[in-house]
Image: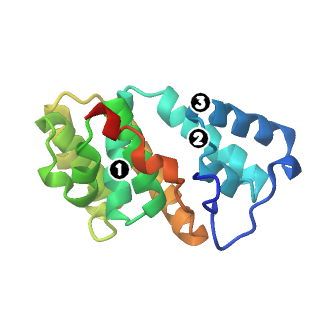
Amino acid sequence: MGEDVPAMTRFPVHDEDELPEDLRERIEYERDRAGFTPNVFLAYGYKPSHFRAFFQYYDALVEDTTLDRDEVEMIVVAVSGANDCLYCNVAHGALLRVYGDDPLLAEQLMSSPSTADLPERQKAMVAFAVKLTDQDRMTDVDEEDFQRLRDHGFTDEEIWDVGAVASFFNLSNRMAHLADMRPNEEFYQLGRDSPDDE
């Protein structure tokens, strides 16, 4: 189940054994962690140099950050919702359910981030990320937006990290649209209670 979902529909997807060794090692590592191979890794295998650059920056965003991991995923889901990105909505919605331990928040952020059940600090963070995403408003980001975040206790480094995650996932969303990346079936249930748990 899930492995039969195509990684993307608009570009060829190479067999794993055709990929360079370092890409195969990363894919194997991700498969061991998740229990399946997230399709984004197979999709980016189309251009190995882009795979390396994309995931190196992704790793920096989630590892070298002042934000909590669930906050990173809140930003990703809100941005991906604003961009109608199926792959990232489903995959990062699953990660938010896991890291945030909340089965409802991802859907709230995808559809209506301003009314999501979040503390005011995180609402301000998400609003800033969504403003950076909105092509009609992103050039209006100004000192008032920065001050609003500072008033909620964000440091300049945290503001940088919020903006970096939002900006990177605007790129990621657009590449997912370009390639028609398809989310694995496993993501849809990840972080949800199974019927046996009810």
CB contact under 8 Å: marks 3 and 1: no
Q: Quadrant of residue 151?
A: top left
Where is residue 138? Give x, y as percent: 31, 62
Q: Image point 24% across, 60% down: which residue? A: 111
Frontmost residue, 24 versus 47: 24
The total of numbered circles placed on residues is 3
Please tell me whether mark 3 or mark 1 is closer to you in this view: 3
Which residue is under mark 3? Answer: 33
Which residue is under mark 2? Answer: 57
Residue lying furthest bottom in this view?
Answer: 10
Horizontally, residue 127 falls left or right of residue 196, namely left
Please tell me whether mark 2 or mark 3 is closer to you in this view: 3
Where is residue 115? Give x, y as percent: 12, 52
Q: CA distance from mark 2 to mark 3?
A: 19 Å
Disc 2 element:
helix
Where is residue 47? Give x, y as percent: 76, 57
What amino acid type is highlighted by mark number 1?
Val
Q: Image point 51% across, 27% down: which residue? A: 63
Q: Image point 12% across, 37% down: which residue? A: 120
Horizontally, residue 18 falls left or right of residue 113, namely right
What amino acid type is highlighted by mark number 3?
Arg
First reached walking from the N terminus: tag 2 or tag 1 = 2
First reached walking from the N terminus: tag 2 or tag 3 = 3
Which residue is under mark 1? Answer: 77
Neighbours of disc 3 within 10 Å: few (<14), some (14-19), many (20+):
few
